[in-house]
Image (spheres, rainbow, N blue to C red):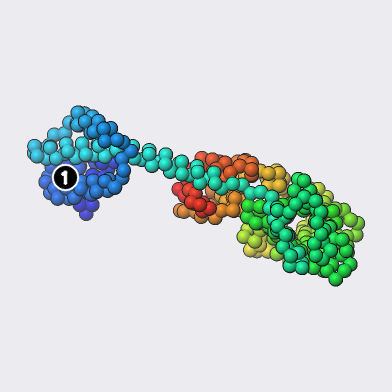
Amino acid sequence: MQEERFSYLFKQYFSKQGGPAEIEELLRLIDSGDYDQQLKTIIDQHYEDFEPIKSPFSTEKENSILTAVLNSSAPAMELKTPGRSRLWTSISIAASLLMCLGIGVYFQQRNTYQNDQELAASLIVPGSNKARLVLGTGEVILLDTLKNGSQNFEGGVQITKTKDGQLIYTIKDSGNKNASLINTIETPRGGQYQVRLPDGTEVWLNAASKLKYSNDFKAKKREVTLSGEAYFEVAHLANRPFLVHTSNQVVEVLGTHFNVDAYPDEENQVTTLLEGQVKTSSKKQNVLLKPGEQAILDLQHDRLKKAEADLESVMAWKNGDFIFKDENLASVMKKVERWYDVDVVFQDVDPKAIKLGGWVSRSKNISGLIKIIEPITGLKIRIDGRRVTVMK
């Protein structure tokens, strides 16, 4: 036990963290002579641990540091045995030299680390307009590579891509045998897209989202199925309701503006109304929303509740921003994963227990977000390729 105490005291002195009482205790143990072998082993170990670290200084600089240390006045210490005094002086010099070199190495390594992290962050660019359309016939169309103008595809589908990248989807003949085919628009992680459906409804899809709909938009009900997040501006058609199906609920409207957040890896599905009126139904409940309200479906308990909405935060993604208001870190980093196409891991951090707020443009590289998250949370973020580690 005393040997462990001796090692601890030496470490405290070596790192300049020991208080006067600990230094005095260490001096007494050294003076006793009972720890000579352990002291030699510890000194050797410190040198062995230090040797592999490449000094940032030139040989000339190292020699000048050593000369300065040797010429500096050693702390006054009264030890009974001259031999012990010489030993302690050599320990002090060795510790001082290692501290000088160690600090230099630390700053060099820190600067190198920071430069590496800045480079890694600069390589992770924000998402962009990209998606693919899978027609009911099985044909796959990469929308971001589609040329501007109108093109005809199988199943009576005509796609027009505008100069600003919007996709206008038209069914030339929904009365044919392909009318019931299901089409799917998918945005990947790091992608978003805007599409106009055959009835004139405009849809903005957030990253990692999927929207399914049939060719037959002349039926009594206009129905789509959503996984992920989308903002809808529904064309008003009397007696032809527009239904959005998610995995656990149905949102029914006639003509209105609303946002549906229904990612499969979230605990809640949230429908937010900006204009008009919508009815949101789960298996057990239904809620009628007015503008500025949202329906929150707790998936674990299948519980639907109504609440006031923060429209600025809800619509931030569609307006090209990240806006966080007292949002937990787990939720924030899920958005980071989707938009920047990265994988986030937490190391010794409970992300649900940490709240933060801030604003940054979604057009910025990931470094813009890191500059917000690190100072607010006091955490560190390390980037290795497309792996983002959040740690203490």
Give the farthest residue toward the right. Answer: 238
Question: In screen coordinates, is 262 left or right of 103?
Answer: right
Residue 185 can be seen, yes or no: yes
Percent position of residue 385, x then y: 51, 52
> For mark 1, does the 10 Å Cα neighbourhood hold few (<14), some (14 to 19), or many (20 or more) residues?
some
Residue 304 can be seen, yes or no: no
Task: Decide which of 378, 299 is in the foreground and name it.
Answer: 378
- Residue of label 1: 29
Percent position of residue 143, x then y: 72, 55
Instruction: Identify the secondary structure beneath mark 1.
Output: helix
Give the farthest residue toward the bottom. Answer: 177
Above-or-below relation of 67 to 179: above
Please name the residue shown 29% across and 47% down the image: 52
Above-or-below relation of 86 to 243: above
Please name the residue shown 31% across and 43% down the image: 54
Q: Within the image, what quadrant is residue 269 found in?
A: bottom right
Percent position of residue 73, x then y: 20, 28
Please name the residue shown 13% across and 34% down the image: 78
Report the number of discs.
Answer: 1
Task: Look at label 1 and name its amino acid.
Answer: Leu
Percent position of residue 323, x then y: 64, 43
Question: In screen coordinates, is 283 left or right of 384?
Answer: right
Task: Decide which of 319, 270 is in the foreground and name it.
Answer: 319
Above-or-below relation of 359 to 155: above
Task: Decide which of 242, 35 is in the foreground and name it.
Answer: 242
Please name the residue shown 71% across and 47% down the image: 318
